[in-house]
Amino acid sequence: MSRSARRRHARSREPRRHWRLLALTLSVVFAALLFEGWTIHEVDAAKSRRPCTRPVPRAVEESGPVLRRINGNDVESSTPPARTVALTYDGGPDPYWTPRLLDLLRRHHAHATFFLFGAQAARHPELVRRILDEGHEIGSNTYTGADLGSSSRVRAAMELTLTQKTLAGSAGVRTDLLRMPLTTQVDTLCGDEWSAAGRAAADGYVLVAADRPDRDPKYGMVRQFSQTDLAYQETKDLLGNPHADRFTTVTDAIGMPSADTRVSTAERWQGKALIWTTTAGHAFTNAMTWVLLALGVLGVLRLLMLTVFARAHVRRLTRFRPGSPWLREVDAPVTVLVPAYNEEAGIESTVHSLLASTHPYLEVIVIDDGSTDRTADLATWIDDPRVRVIRQPNSGKAAALNTGLAHASYDIVVMVDADTVFEPDALYRLIQPLAHPAIGAVSGNTKVGNRRGLLGRWQHLEYVFGFNLDRRMFEVLECMPTVPGAIGAFRRDALMGVGGVSEDTLAEDTDLTMALWRAGWRVVYEESAIAWTEVPTSLRQLWRQRYRWCYGTLQAMWKHRSAVLEVGSAGRFARRGLTYLMLFQVVLPLVAPVIDLFALYGMLFSDPAQSLGIWLAFLGIQLLCAGYALRLDGEKLRALWSMPFQVFVYRQLMYLVVIQSVFALLGGTRLKWHRMQRAGTAATEQLRHPVAARELSSR
C-alpha cells in the first residue's frame, strides 16, 4: 500500500448517518406493523361478549330502538312511525356486497343507514363517498368491530375516534350515530354494554339498536342487516312488503337532523393521513407476507442445495481422490508465506506447526509488516534453516504477501495467516489437487481452535456449516469465490499471471480468487487439509473482523462485476458465484431486520402457533443440515445446542455488519485495516482433540 493510500485510510471515517436512517426505518416499520396488528388482529379487543352481570334497565327495555339521550337509567328513545322502515346495514363497506346493496336500494328508490367499520372504510374510501352521494346515511360500527363493553376504556375510545377520523378522511364527514358491535335489540345493552353505551352517549352519540326481525313493518321498525347474500335476499323481500310505505335512514325515520356533518379541512387531512398510513401498513404486510414466503422458500432450497451438493462433493472425492492412480502425487517443494503484524501471541505456534509438517520440502517466509511488538524477533529466534524473516514498514497484508511472493523460491506457494496452526499432514494434503494442470488454487479446511465459549461455538458452527459446506457446493458448481487467507495453496505462475495480490480491496483473498477464475484457472476445496485458527472472543472484535471481510467482499464483487458477461469458466463462475453472494450475503441480510420485525409481528398479532411452527420447522431443517455438515467434517454434534440462540444475537450482528458495509461502500468510505487482538489460542481445540484430522481423513 502506498504512503498516500495509507494517509487516505487513516483519514477515513466510518459513516454514522445510516444508523439513524436504519433506526428511523425500523421504527416506522414497527409503528406501521403495530398499528396494523392493533387494528386488524385487534389486540386488547374482545370478539365475544362477557356474560351480563345485571339486566338492562327497565326504562331501556321498554324504549324504542333509537336511544337519543341517556341519563343514568333514564333514556329518551324514538321509534319510526307506522309503515316506515329504517334500513340499517352493519359492517363493511364490503367491496362485493355494498355496491350490490346500493344498486338494489336505488332501483327501489329506498335509502338506508350504513354502520361502517373504520378499518374497512379506510380500505374502501370510494364506497364511503358513494354511500353519501346516493343519499344514504353513515353511522359508526367502531373501527374493528370490537365489543366495547369487554374492551378496555382506552381501546373503546380509540375505536370511536379512529372511525371518526377515517370518515373525515374518506368523505369529509363525521357521524353522531353509533351501533355497538355484537348487539341487536335494546335488551342486549346489558351489563358492561350499558356502561359503554352511557360513555358513548356522554360523548354525543345517538345509539341505534334494532327491532326484532319478525316485527310487522306496519308498526314501524328499525331493521338490522349484515352485508351478505342472505341480507341481500332479505332486503329484497322487505322492499316488496306491502305493509311498508317508506324505506329510509334512521334520522329521517324519527325526524332528526342528518347525523352526518361536514368536518374542517384540518380534520379531513388528519383523516387522510390515517387512511394513507392504514393503506401503507396493509400493503406492507401483504407484500412482506409474499416476500417472507419467497425468502423462506429460497432459504429452504439453499439448505437443501448445500446438502445435495455436499453429498455430491463427497461422492466425487470418493471416486477421484487426489493421490489416486488418476493423478500423480505432488511432492514438489513449497514456499509458505506468513504475513504478520503484531502477532507475537501466535507466530511461534504457527511456524512450528508448519515445520512439523509431514511434507518436508518447504521454506517458511515470515513477512513482518512493521510490527511494534516482538513478532519478528520471535520468528527470527526459531532455529531452523527453512525459516526466513523479512521486515518491512507497515504497508498492509496484500503488500506483505507480494513481498513474500517476490522472495519465494518454489513454484507452489501456500499463504497462511499468522494465527493459524496446521495439522501435520495439512500441507501435503493441501497441495495434492495441484496435480491437475487446470487447478490454480486450493482452499483448505479452516477450523475454529478457541471454541469453548458461546461466541466461539457460534463461529465454530458458522465455519463448519456455513463456510465449509458452502465451499463444497462452490467446488461442485465451479464457482469458489474465496480461498481463505488462513490456508490456501497457489501456483506461483498463476499468481504472477494476475499481477500478484491486489491492494484494491480489503478482502485480498477473495479478490485474488476471483482474478484467478477470470484468468482461466480452476479453484477447488480440499476438506482434509485442516488448519486451526483463532476467532474473535468478543462481539466488538467479531464486528471489526466481519466488517472488514464483508466490506472487502463487496469491493471484490464490484471490481469483478463485468465477469458475468464473459464466456467460459470466468463467466460461469461470475454468474453462479457472484449471484449467490449477492442474493444470500447481501440482499437477504439487508432485508433481514424487517423480516425479523415481521416475524415478531406474526408471533404477537397473527397466529402465534403457526408462526412458531414455521420458525421451528425452519430451525429443524437448519439443525439437520448443520448436523450433516458436522459429520462430514468429523466434528461432534454436541455443538448444535447453541445454534438456536444464534437468532437472538449472532445473526443480528452479521446482518448489521452487511448493512454497515453496504452503506460504507455506497458512501465512498475507505475502510482502514482492523486488527484483532490475539491470545495465541488457535491450537486449543487441536490439542484437546489431536485425532480430529485423522477421523476426517479416514472416512
Image: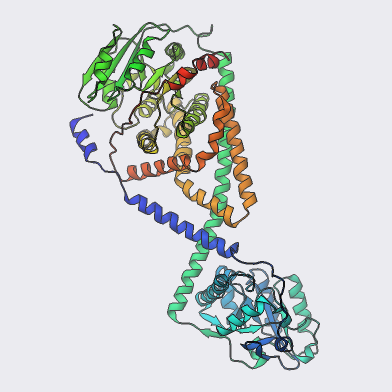
Q: Left or right: where does residue 574 sit relative to residue 503?
A: right
Residue 473 in the image: x percent, y percent?
52, 27
In the rendered view, would you say 491 is above or below 505? above
Could you say which is closer to the camera, residue 131 or residue 75?
Answer: 75
Could you say which is closer to the camera, residue 531 or residue 246?
Answer: 531
- The residue located at (47%, 57%) in the rendering is 29
Residue 179 appears in the figure: yes
Q: Left or right: where does residue 358 sit relative to residue 288?
A: left
Residue 326 in the image: x percent, y percent?
53, 8
Could you say which is closer to the camera, residue 681 or residue 295?
Answer: 681
Residue 402 in the image: x percent, y percent?
27, 21
In the rendered view, would you say 64 is above or below 544? below
Residue 165 in the image: x percent, y percent?
51, 75
In the rendered view, would you say 5 is above or below 174? above
Which quarter of the image is occupied by the C terminus? top right
Residue 309 appears in the figure: no
The image's colouring method is: rainbow
In the rendered view, would you say 497 is above or below 649? above
Which quarter of the image is occupied by the N terminus? top left
Q: Residue 428: which quarter of the image?
A: top left
Q: Left or right: where does residue 379 sit relative to residue 58?
A: left
How many numbered callouts? Answer: 0
Q: Residue 255: which quarter of the image?
A: bottom right
Could you say which is closer to the camera, residue 604 or residue 496?
Answer: 604
- The residue located at (34%, 27%) in the rendering is 678
Residue situated furthest left in the rendering: 3
- The residue located at (59%, 65%) in the rendering is 44
